[in-house]
Amino acid sequence: MKINDAKRCVKELRVRFWYEGLRQVLHANSPWEIERKFNRPALHRESDVLCISNSWRRYREGRSLPRKSSVRRFDVWIQQLNGPAESNFSSELYNVLWDILLLEKINHTRLKKFTEKAGDSLRVNIERWWHAEVNQTRQRPWVRISRSLVHMGSMDGLAGLVLIWVYYYQVENYFAICDIAEAIYRSMLVVGISFRTRGLDKEFFDLFIMRVFNLIAWRDSMCLLDYNLFYTSLDIIEYSMKKMKNEESADAYLLNKNRISPRREFFKIVFQFDLPIFPVWGEGPPTKLQWIGYVEKKYNWFKKFITIREAYLIGA
């Protein structure tokens, strides 16, 4: 995928994700309704916001990135209406994930630059991983950091996973690339619920397919991940949350740090999901041993997936 195409896709998704969040909080059905709600005396001056309908139409389509000053004012205004919990849209729009998705190469200087933009939790995790990687204090240092970042259950955690994936992709560490790709998929299932809520889960999935999974040259294997599987897995994740805490939304549940035990149980479910990677062979028909290996691995994967589905989705 060309970098210009990637920039366009990332820009469209980030702006549409921000716009849909605003629209849903304001209970608006069109760009015109959002503009009308923001063009109010509470903001003191009309010049404080973009009061042109075409601007909000461009935001809906992801064609134009709003000014930071305007975004901050929108957050303040929503906080006055709905409280602090509903006023974090600027952090989503300017999350470090969007820049990291465009990375082609990474070094220590750029690594520090990106982690400084993120929260303390991501910065600490990345610094520990980098120390272990450079000083070789631990075998396969990416395993522990991957689990920690998935457990963050946030866009920051997903950004950290993509960041270290880019590093190992650059140095051509195949085993790290595959392990982190599986962690990225699990983190996508958690973060993807927010994108589904705003009707953008398909675009979210397609972007990661292009920027991560399609770039991996699977050795003697193939990855059969598609949107239908991702959609069904999101169903399982969302319904499992509701089953454990019916009165809370999926996002509110993840943000409630005091509920340690239910949160831990939830991530046990998340870590049961594996990428559908099955062996393939080169030229000619497979040998009997190759075919048996393929059938067994595919059978075991589907058996595990159906078991998860029946346990957490059926009857939820």
Image (cartoon, rainbow, N blue to C red):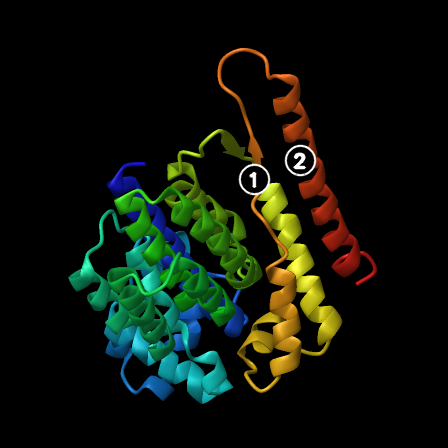
Name the quadrant containing residue 289. top right
Task: Please name whichever residue, 59 or 312, is drawn nearer the observer in this view of the structure.
Answer: 312
Q: Which mark is residue 46?
A: none
| Label 1 neighbour load within 10 Å: few <14, some 14-19, many 20+ | few
Q: Position of residue 27 (x, y in %)?
A: 55, 71
Q: Position of residue 207 (x, y in %)?
A: 42, 46
Quarter of the C terminus within the rendering:
bottom right
What is the CA distance from the residue labelled 1 to the residue labelled 2?
15 Å
Amino acid at pointer 1:
Asp
Answer with left or right where residue 118 lies relative to residue 149: left
* 212 w.r.t. 23: above or below: above
Answer with left or right where residue 294 lies relative to residue 94: right
- x 59%, y 48%: residue: 230
- x 43%, y 88%: residue: 80
Residue 52 seen by the camera:
no
Marks 1, 2: nearer the viewer: 2
Quarter of the N terminus within the rendering:
top left
Task: Please name whichever residue, 24 or 203, is drawn nearer the observer in this view of the structure.
Answer: 203
Secondary structure at numbered mark 2? helix
| Label 2 neighbour load within 10 Å: few <14, some 14-19, many 20+ | some
* 28 w.r.t. 63: above or below: below
Task: Please name whichever residue, 297 or 81, is drawn nearer the observer in this view of the structure.
Answer: 297
Answer with left or right where residue 84 lies relative to residue 275: left
Q: Which mark is residue 298?
A: 2
Which of the two labelled residues, at mark 1 and mark 2, occupies the earlier sequence position?
1
* Tag 1 residue: 226
Task: Please name whichever residue, 14 or 57, is drawn nearer the observer in this view of the structure.
Answer: 14
* 267 w.r.t. 98: above or below: below
Q: In the image as oriented, which residue stretches furthest toward the top?
A: 284
Secondary structure at numbered mark 1? loop
Q: In the image as oriented, which residue stretches furthest toward the left?
A: 109
